[in-house]
Image (cartoon, grey):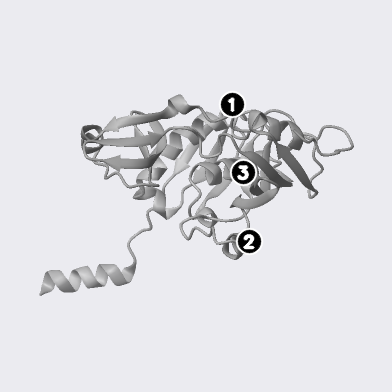
Amino acid sequence: MVIPEISGVMTMNAGDIVKLTYNLWIVEQDKETLFDTTDENFAKENGIYDPERKYGPEIYIIGKKMLLESVEKQIMNAEVGKEYDIILEPKDAYGERNPNLVKVVSMREFEKNKITPEIGKFVTINGQRGKVVNVTPGRVLVDFNHPLAGKKLHYKVTVKEIVEGLENKVLAIIEMAYGKDMDQFKVKELEDHIEIKLAESCKYRNEWFTSKYYIVGTLRDYTQKDIYFIEVYEGKKEEEKKEESTVVQQ
């Protein structure tokens, strides 16, 4: 592992919420291939743009194993706004490839999970995520190694912000867990509780109901105050009342 030269005192501790940008390359025989990035334009330039993805700084909580341990150790000493290069050998990243994790899975198992196996497709079987590498009558070969196992990696990482203040931390945790319609969420810290006015989409998106429990559990690490979620339903407007009255009269 190549450690960047980082001067100054430690700026981050376990529990700190940070916003990061990064580029990640796979290094093979001195050639680097971009694998992931938070920069939308850079992704387009390198042919890895995902229209379903939201680009921009990503949110992480230090000490929650959301980052590679080797990367996290380095950014805990990083200066905000400064870019750092981190080179990781496989043992410091996702480990070496394990041939025992390339397994034959019966077609019946795919049928039971209502999955159509296709070469190159990522699937989840019995709680394990893997990549389909071969399909033959009656069985499928799946590689359950991490896609970056056995790879040397090159990160360029910038800590854009250390989130301060309880209200901002609440919003950051919501963005990390849910990430939709963030301009509609409103957070207010009161004397004995925290009020979170929900975005309109929380009323009908299934993702919110899963995210909510994670958000509450995480917020309890930052405050002992009660947490109030507020859904707002606007009152009936005069125009609506008149329309309803007209329908009834007809």
Q: Which residue is mark 3?
A: 59
> In the drawing, what numbered circle is on residue 88?
none
Front tag of 2 and 1: 2
Q: Nearer the viewer, residue 124 or 105?
A: 105
Does residue 238 appear in the picture of this structure? Answer: yes
Name the quadrant containing residue 223: top right
- View extreme (right): residue: 8
Q: Which residue is mark 1?
A: 224
Residue 96 at what x, y percent from top left?
A: 58, 29
> Left or right of 107: which side holds 12?
right
Residue 169 at what x, y percent from top left?
A: 63, 40
Answer above or below: position of 44 versus 36: below
Q: Which residue is mark 2?
A: 42
Quadrant in the picture for the N terminus: top right
Q: CA distance from mark 3 to mark 2?
A: 19 Å
Name the quadrant containing residue 126: top left
- Look at label 3 and name its amino acid: Ile
Q: Secondary structure at mark 3?
A: strand
